[in-house]
């Protein structure tokens, strides 16, 4: 009994001594951790200050001979300060060289050389526009004074095109959006499906448009005439109870006949509106596909998207881990053509008011 009591007392004394050691070690660790954080903050602050000093040395010319440094150029952008690597791209450097040597730029284009990055879709020898995050603000200044062609995306090609209505009742409407027309208004006041619907149904309540299609994509768009029906239709999309079928024409001949693509997608923060595949930041995106025809070095396929991520079909078609065959005419992930050969051909869902099963189809004209 005495031995047991002694051992218990010894155990408590040992436990107390060890707790004091752990506490002392913890305090020493916290002091070191605080010192590390202080040094990291100092390094970050010094690095940012040095970077701004370097950016101030990038004195970019435009065609009028006006000069702005990168800090001035990015001051009016949402990020306020230049991102890392700004000013290091080929196009600003070539323009700067031309202006410094009194040369007149006649045309310009950037193409990719070498292997594609893992996250982005780049093919050797293909031309790609400058990135939005780093180059666009710089080029807005550098192109001032140059005679440049108008932006084709700002051409209102469908102002006189009649809106084709494929299905309509007192609660909802399905229309055909032509390729090159916006689903909703953008920055340049171009005509859009939403504006047309507002004109057709001035007494409609709610947001009208239930889902969107890319400007370059043609096909079926679903709209609701009341706020309540709009909410119900959105719930059908969220629970994947609205089935969509797309038709696309792919570059090259696809080897497999059918399958499923499962690649997570998120926006590319430095190059919007491009999307990128990212297993760290991306949201799951799933697409089923089936080959319809192989002809003249092209493949006609049907896509069934199980999720609704931005540019999902375009990225899944072009990415090396997807089909590795871009959609014909995809100027973001492939090569330009007369149009993007992607068409939303069919919608199938249960009417949220009548309970009737609707199957609306307009096949692609390509």
Image (tube, helix red, strand yellow):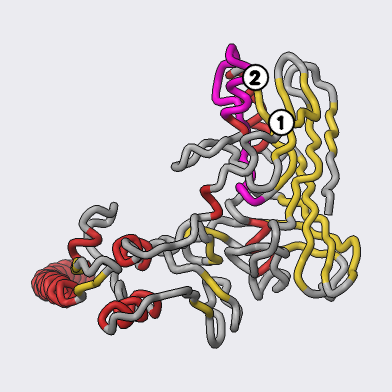
**Residue at x-position 43% and y-position 66%:** 131
For the N terminus, give its image quadrant.
Answer: bottom left
Q: Name the residue that disc number 1 marks.
A: 163
Spot occupied by residue 245 in the image (x, y as percentages of width and height): 79, 47
Alpha-carbon distance for marks 2 and 1? Answer: 10 Å
Location of residue 250 by image quarter: bottom right
- Report the residue that reaches farthest toward the top: 203
Indicate the position of residue 302 as horizontal and vertical percent values. Answer: 82, 56
Q: Magenta residues, as a range?
A: 195-216
- Determine the main secondary structure of the stretch shown in magenta: loop
Considering every residue shown, the one lying at the far bottom of the view is 114
Look at 78% across and 32% down and name the residue there: 349
Precedes in sequence: disc 2 or disc 1: 1
Number of other residues with Cα within 10 Å of mark 1, as a class: few under 14, some 14 to 19, many 20 or more: some
Q: Which residue is mark 2?
A: 200
Residue 174 badge: none
**Residue 86 shown left or right of residue 31 in the figure:** right
Q: Nearer the viewer, residue 16 or 120?
A: 120
Residue 194 or 8: which is nearer the viewer? 194
Q: Quadrant of residue 323?
A: bottom right
Q: Nearer the viewer, residue 27 or 101?
A: 101
Q: Is residue 55 left or right of residue 112?
A: left
Question: Does residue 180 lie above or below 269 as drawn?
Answer: above
Q: Are marks 2 and 1 in contact (CB under 8 Å)?
A: yes
Q: Residue at x 58, y 22 (%)?
A: 198
């Amino acid at each position: 009994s005495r031995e047991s009591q002694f051992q218990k007392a010894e155990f408590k004394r040992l436990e107390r001594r060890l707790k004091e050691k752990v506490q002392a070690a913890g305090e020493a660790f916290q002091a070191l951790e605080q010192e590390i954080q202080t040094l990291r903050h100092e390094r970050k602050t010094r690095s940012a200050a040095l970077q701004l000093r370097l950016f101030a040395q990038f004195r970019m010319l435009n065609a009028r001979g006006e000069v702005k440094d990168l800090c001035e150029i990015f001051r009016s952008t949402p990020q306020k300060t230049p991102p890392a690597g700004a000013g290091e791209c080929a196009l600003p450097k070539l323009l700067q060289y031309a202006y410094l040597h009194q040369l007149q730029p006649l045309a310009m284009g950037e193409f990719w050389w070498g292997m594609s990055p893992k996250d982005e879709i780049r093919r050797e020898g293909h031309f790609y526009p400058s990135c939005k995050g780093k180059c666009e603000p710089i080029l807005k200044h550098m192109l001032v004074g140059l005679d440049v062609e108008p932006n084709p995306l700002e051409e209102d090609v469908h102002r006189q095109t009649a809106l084709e209505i494929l299905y309509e009742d007192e609660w909802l409407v399905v229309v055909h959006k032509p390729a090159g027309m916006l689903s909703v208004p953008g920055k340049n006041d171009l005509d859009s499906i939403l504006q047309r619907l507002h004109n057709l149904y001035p007494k409609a309540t709610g947001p009208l448009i239930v889902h969107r299609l890319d400007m370059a994509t043609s096909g079926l768009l679903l709209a609701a005439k009341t706020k309540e029906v709009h909410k119900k239709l959105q719930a059908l999309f969220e629970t994947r109870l609205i089935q969509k079928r797309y038709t696309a024409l792919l570059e090259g001949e696809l080897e497999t006949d059918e399958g499923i693509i499962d690649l997570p997608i998120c926006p590319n923060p430095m190059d919007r509106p491009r999307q990128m595949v990212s297993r760290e930041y991306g949201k799951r995106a799933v697409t089923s596909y089936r080959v319809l025809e192989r002809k003249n070095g092209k493949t006609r396929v049907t896509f069934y998207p199980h999720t609704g991520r931005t540019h999902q079909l375009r990225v899944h078609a072009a990415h090396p881990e997807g089909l590795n065959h871009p959609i014909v005419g995809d100027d973001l992930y492939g090569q330009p053509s007369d149009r993007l050969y992607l068409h939303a051909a069919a919608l199938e869902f249960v009417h949220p008011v009548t309970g009737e099963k609707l199957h609306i189809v307009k096949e692609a004209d390509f």
